[in-house]
Image (cartoon, rainbow, N blue to C red):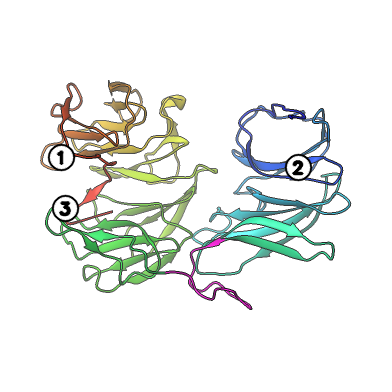
Amino acid sequence: MQAYGSYLGRLLNALAIAVDSSGNSYIAGFTASDHLPDPLVGGLRLPNAGAFSYVIKMNASGSALDYYATLGDETSSPLSAPFAISVAPGGSLTFASLVHSAAALPGSVPVAYVAALDASGSTLLSSRQVVLDSKDATTFSAVRLDPAGNLYLGGRTRSSTFPVVAALQNTTATSLTSLFQSTDGGTSWIPFDQNIAGVGTAIAVHPTNANDLVAGTVNRILRSADGGSSWTATYTVSRVSDLARSPANPNDLFASEWSSIHRSVDGGTTWQYLKNLGGVSVTRLALDPANSNTLYAYSIGGLFKSSDGGVSFTRLGQGTLSAPTSVIVSPAGPIYICTDSVQNSLDGGGTWTVVLPNLNCLGMVLAPSNPSVLYVSTGTQLYKTSNGGANWTFVPASGIVTAVPRLTPRRCI
C-alpha cells in the first residue's frame, strides 16, 4: 500500500535515497532547475552556477521538508552529484560524490569525495578525497557506515591496477574486444585493440595518412604513428566519449570526456582542457569541415555549438533538439541532426527544418563522394536522400539495420 507520493520541484534528478529508523527519507541528486522545493527551509547553501547537487530530508509522513541543502556545482565544489548516501545513528548523513575532471581538476581522472552532513543539514562535519586508483575511473555507487564508524564503499572500476587487499578476485577480465578494423570496405573485420592498454572508446584517423591514429580509452588518450602496432599515452582522462579530427587541419583534434572538452593542435601529442558544459554529459562531437574552430557537442541534453574552438558554447534549438543521436556537418554547408526526426539547418544552427519526420532516427552517414547523399538508419529501416533531404527513398535491406556509426577511412568504431 502506498503511504504517500509527492512532487519535488521540477527536474530534480534523484541519484540516491536513504531512510532513517524514524522513517524520514533523504534524497540526493543534481538539477539545473530554478523550480525548487520551498527555499525557506533550512540547510547548507553552497554557491552554484548551472547544474548543481542537492540533499533533501523529508519527514516520515511525506508532508514537509526538514531541510534542503545545496552542495554546489561541478566547477565550484567537490561535492557534486552525490550518488550514494547513508544515514548514521543520530541523523547525520554520509554521501559519496565524484568529480569528472571539473575546472579545478583539468585533464585529471575522476576524484571521489566522501562527506558527512550534520543532522540539521546545515553544516559539513567532514569532507575527504578518496583516490583508490590514479590511472582509471573508479565509480562508487554505494556507501554505508557501521555502528563503529567504519566506512564501506562499493562500485565499479575498469582499472587493471585497482588496489586489492585480501581479495576474493585478484584480477579483472581483459579479453573483450573494443575496436575492430576492416581493410576490405567492411566485408570482414578483425580485432584492432590488442596493443591498446584498456578499453577503446573512440578513434580518429588522419585523412591522408592511415598510420597516424589517435585513440581514446576509459582512462587516457593514445597516439600511434605506425598504424596501431604501437601506442604512446599522451593524456590522462577518465573516459573519452568521442574524438573529432578536423578535415580542415588534421593536427587539430577535440576530445569529449563526460561534460568536459579538450583540444590538441599538434596531432594528439599534447592536450589542453577547454570547457566544462556544466553537467551536460557529451556523447559525441562534430566539426565543421571547413573551420576547425566551429565545433558541435551533443548528448541527451541537446545540441551545443562553439565558434571559438571550444572556449565557449551556445545551446541550439531552444530545447527542440533534445537527445540527438547523430549530427553531421556537410562540406556543402547544411547541418543534419538525428532525433525523433531528421532536421537540417542552412544557417549554422540558427533555424531548423524537419526533412524526414516521425521516425526513430538512430544514426546517419554522409557519402564522401557526394555531400547531397545521406543515409539514415532507424534500427530496422534505411532511408536515402540524393538531394540534401528534399526527397527520401526507402532502401530495402535484409535483416536488421543497426545504427550507422561515424566511419573513418579503412577503420571504424
Residue density around tag 1, few if under 14, some if 14–19, many if 20 or more, within 10 Å: few
Q: Nearer the viewer, residue 359 or 234?
A: 359
Marks 3 and 1: which is nearer the front? 3
| Disc number placed over residue 367 in the picture, else none | 1
- Point out the residue furthest to the front here: 1
- Residue type pointed to by label 2: Tyr
* Residue appearing at x 25%, y 69% in the figure: 228
Which quadrant would residue 250 be assigned to in this image? bottom left
Label 2 vs label 3: CA separation? Answer: 52 Å
The vertical placement of 100 against 321, above or below, is below
Tell me the magenta residue range: 156-173
- Residue type pointed to by label 1: Ala
For the residues bearing labels 1 and 2, Cβ distance under 8 angstroms: no
Image location of residue 98, percent across then percent down? 61, 55
Q: Nearer the viewer, residue 402 or 319?
A: 402
Which quadrant would residue 349 be assigned to in this image? top left
Q: Does the segment drawn in magenta span residue 116?
A: no
Q: Secondary structure at mark 1?
A: loop
Residue at the spot of label 2:
26
Marks 1 and 2: which is nearer the front? 2
Image location of residue 360, percent across then percent down? 34, 30
Q: Nearer the viewer, residue 130 or 19?
A: 19
- Point out the residue furthest to the right here: 90
Residue density around tag 3, few if under 14, some if 14–19, many if 20 or more, within 10 Å: few
Label 3 vs label 1: CA separation? Answer: 15 Å
